[in-house]
Image (spheres, rainbow, N blue to C red):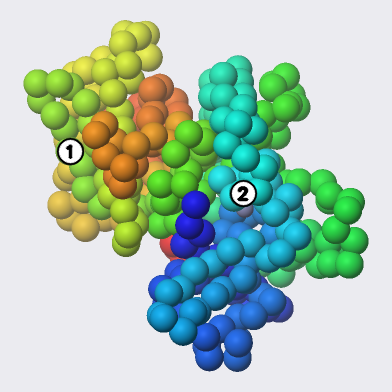
Amino acid sequence: MKIEWAYYENGDDTEEVYYEHLDKDLYESKYQEHLYCISDECDAMIKFTHRKNGVKFFSTWNGQGDLHDIECPYFLKDKGEVERKNILHQIESAPVTDEHIINTILNKSKKLKEKEKRKKQNTRIMTRRTLQGKQTSQPEKIDNGEIDQFGSSSIRIFSLDSKHITPDYVGYRKCVFGKIRHVYFHETDGYVYLNLDNAQYRVSIYLPQAFYADPEKTTKSALVSFVDIIKQELHVHKELVIICVGMIQFKKGSQQDVNIHVINPSHLLINDMKYYEIITNSSVSSNPYNYL
Ligand SMILES: [Zn+2]
């Protein structure tokens, strides 16, 4: 597994860093001991190596492998494939209610809107500061959803910016957010791709036929209307930020392209609007997350 992104954090100065963009001198002069796992929920520090032969890579700081969250692909780095498979199986088979998913995306939307406000009291910075020097006691983790009231409290669905998705996240259920680049509807097979922002990989939200299998939730013709509205809005260069929950899987026949499988219309929001709100309004409101 290759860690490609890290999060730089030094006081109020923060930045998302791609490993190829660093070199030894730059790393040592600025980033060393200030890089963390890109997942909000992880406290593990990330180390950059630039070998004499030019090879560059990120790795988890020695001894911090278990400071990744258990649902981070880098958590089990040293613990073997069997244990990793067990965890992935648990994630996949865990009962997750629609209410929990809806709550997760609504909370994520709220948090993205409030991000500016929260900067001054960044929970994540507090968490890491608390951790320094006492790594044995895990601080309480912040969740995307207030899950307890829905009775699925052991399941946490953590969020990930589409920009940071790599094939390492295949097999995990995530709350993914990102800008829609383009939309594709396959007429004969009846599925939809919403292609998202990512410089390295082709990352798409995949709406399979199952998305409209239950006519009480939506129909194929409603999905077609939805796709047409998204197309129109992209055509006039409106910024569309989608937040959704789904399993991340490889695209069929690929080891590079990844899809986020969304199987229910209530499992997504675009610019804070629900699926049926978009269809009813025949338009999407402007991007409420200004800084994204
Ligand atoms: Zn991590």
Which residue corresponds to the image point at 9% horizontal and 21% vertical from the top-left? 188
> Looking at mark 1, is its residue's CB closer than 8 Å to ligand 1?
no
Counting other residues with Cα less than 10 Å from the Cα at mark 2, is it few (<14), some (14-19), or many (20 or more)? Answer: some
- Residue bearing mark 2: 77
Residue 84 in view in this figure: yes
Of the two numbered discs 1 and 2 on the same chain, state the one appearing first in sequence. Answer: 2
Query: In the rendered picture of this protein, how many numbered marks are placed on residues?
Result: 2
Quadrant of res 247: top left
- Label 2 is placed on what type of residue? Lys
Where is residue 200 shown, x and y percent of the image? Answer: 32, 59
Give the structural element (helix, strand or loop) at label 2.
loop
User: Where 182 falls versus 84 (above or below)?
Assistant: below
- Label 1 is placed on what type of residue? Tyr
Instruction: Using the image as rendered, state which of residue 47 and residue 41 is in the foreground.
Output: 47
Which residue corresponds to the image point at 62% horizontal and 71% vertical from the top-left? 47
Which residue corresponds to the image point at 15% horizontal and 21% vertical from the top-left? 189
Where is residue 42 shown, x and y percent of the image? Answer: 67, 53
Task: Indicate which label's residue lies in the foreground, 1 or 2.
Answer: 2
Where is residue 85 shown, x and y percent of the image? Answer: 57, 30
Report the Cα–Cα distance between label 1 and label 2. Answer: 36 Å
- Residue bearing mark 1: 184
